[in-house]
C-alpha cells in the first residue's frame, strides 16, 4: 500500500511538472509581448526579457494613433459581429433541418458539409477572389459573406451532433400548442443549444478577429481596414533602417487584448460546449 501511494505521488508530481512546463511555454509569448510594450527601443534591444524600468503607457498611445485604433476596431467589430451572426443563424437552421429530416438527401448534404472541412483555403483562394471581384463583392459585405461560407462546415457539424440530443417530444408538444415553424425553432429548440452556440460564437469570433489573409485579399488598403490590416499597412511600423519595436509591440498588444479578454471571460463556455457536444454527438 505504501509503495502504491509513493508511486501515485510520483506520477502526480510528473504530471504537474509537465503541465507547468506547458503553461509556461504557452504563456511566454504573452509575457514577452506585455513587458516589451512599455519599453523604449533601446531598452527592448538591451533587455527584451526583463520587466520595464518604468511602465510607460505613451507607447500604447502612439501605437493606437498609428493604426487608427477607433476606426479599425469599429470595422473589425462590424465584420466580426455580422459574420458570426450569419454563421450561427444559417448553420443552426441547416443542422436542425438535417437532423429532423432523415432522408438520403439530408445525409448526403451532411457528408458534403463534413467533407468541406477537409478542403484547404489555399486551394480555392484565387478562384474565389476572382469570383468575388467579378460579382463586385471585393468589399466589406463580400468579406462577411465569405466568412459566413467558410464558417458553415465546421459549425453545421457541431450543431448537428448537438441537435440530436434535443428531444423530439418537445417539438411535437410545441406544434400541438400551435407554434409556427419560426416559433418552434427560435423559442423552443434554439434556446436549448446555448452551450454549443456560445462555443460557436467565441471560436468563430476569435478566428475572424485575428484573421489577416482574407481581409488582405478582399479589402486591401482601403478605409474599411480591420485591425490586422491596419497593423500591416501602418508605415511607421516598418522602419527603413530597422524595426521600430517600441511601436510594433504595443500595436500588436492592442490588437490582441480585446479578443484575449473575451476568451478569458468566456473560456468556461467554450469547454462546456465542446464537452457537451462530444457527449451528445
Image (cartoon, rainbow, N blue to C red):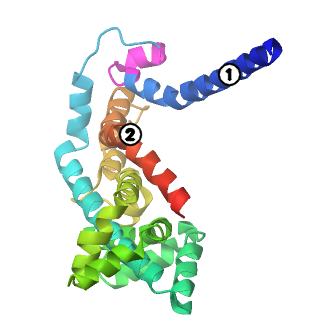
The residue located at (28%, 15%) in the rendering is 55
> Is disc 1 surrounded by few (<14), some (14 to 19) or many (20+) residues within 10 Å?
few
Q: Is residue 62 visible from the viewing direction of this image?
A: yes
Is residue 144 shown above or below 236? below
Checking the image for residue 12, the label placed there is 1
| Residue drawn at (67%, 25%) of the image | 15
Please name the residue shown 34% across and 58% down the image. 194
Q: Secondary structure at mark 2?
A: loop
Q: Compare residues 168 and 100 and report the one nearer the observer.
A: 168
Query: From the image, which quarter does the N terminus lie in?
Result: top right
**Where are the magenta residues, as a range?**
35-49
Contact between marks 1 and 2 (CB within 8 A): the answer is no
Which quadrant of the view contains residue 241?
top left
Vertical order, 39 against 245 (above or below): above
What residue is disc 2 on? 238
Q: Which quadrant of the structure image shows residue 224?
A: bottom left
Amino acid at each position: 500500500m505504501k509503495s502504491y501511494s509513493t508511486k501515485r505521488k510520483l506520477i502526480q508530481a510528473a504530471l504537474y511538472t509537465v503541465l507547468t512546463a506547458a503553461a509556461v511555454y504557452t504563456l511566454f509569448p504573452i509575457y514577452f509581448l506585455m513587458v516589451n510594450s512599455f519599453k523604449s527601443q533601446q531598452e527592448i534591444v538591451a533587455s527584451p526579457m526583463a520587466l520595464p524600468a518604468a511602465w510607460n503607457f505613451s507607447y500604447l498611445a502612439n501605437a493606437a494613433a498609428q493604426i487608427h485604433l477607433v476606426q479599425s476596431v469599429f470595422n473589425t467589430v462590424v465584420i466580426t459581429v455580422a459574420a458570426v451572426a450569419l454563421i450561427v443563424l444559417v448553420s443552426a437552421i441547416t443542422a436542425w433541418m438535417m437532423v429532423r429530416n432523415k432522408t438520403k438527401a439530408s445525409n448526403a448534404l451532411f457528408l458534403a458539409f463534413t467533407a468541406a472541412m477537409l478542403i484547404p483555403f489555399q486551394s480555392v483562394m484565387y478562384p474565389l477572389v476572382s469570383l468575388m471581384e467579378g460579382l463586385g463583392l471585393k468589399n466589406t459585405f463580400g468579406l462577411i459573406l465569405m466568412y459566413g461560407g467558410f464558417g458553415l462546415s465546421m459549425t453545421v457539424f457541431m450543431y448537428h451532433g448537438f441537435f440530436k440530443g434535443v428531444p423530439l417530444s418537445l417539438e411535437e408538444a410545441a406544434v400541438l400548442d400551435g407554434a409556427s415553424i419560426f416559433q418552434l425553432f427560435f423559442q423552443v429548440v434554439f434556446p436549448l443549444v446555448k452551450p454549443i452556440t456560445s462555443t460557436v460564437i467565441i471560436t468563430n469570433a476569435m478566428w475572424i478577429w485575428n484573421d489577416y489573409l482574407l481581409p488582405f485579399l478582399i479589402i486591401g488598403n482601403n478605409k474599411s481596414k480591420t485591425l490586422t490590416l491596419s497593423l500591416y499597412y501602418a508605415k511607421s511600423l516598418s522602419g527603413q533602417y530597422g524595426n521600430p519595436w517600441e511601436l510594433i509591440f504595443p500595436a500588436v498588444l492592442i490588437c490582441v487584448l480585446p479578443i484575449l479578454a473575451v476568451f478569458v471571460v468566456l473560456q468556461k463556455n467554450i469547454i462546456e460546449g465542446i464537452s457537451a457536444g462530444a457527449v451528445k454527438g
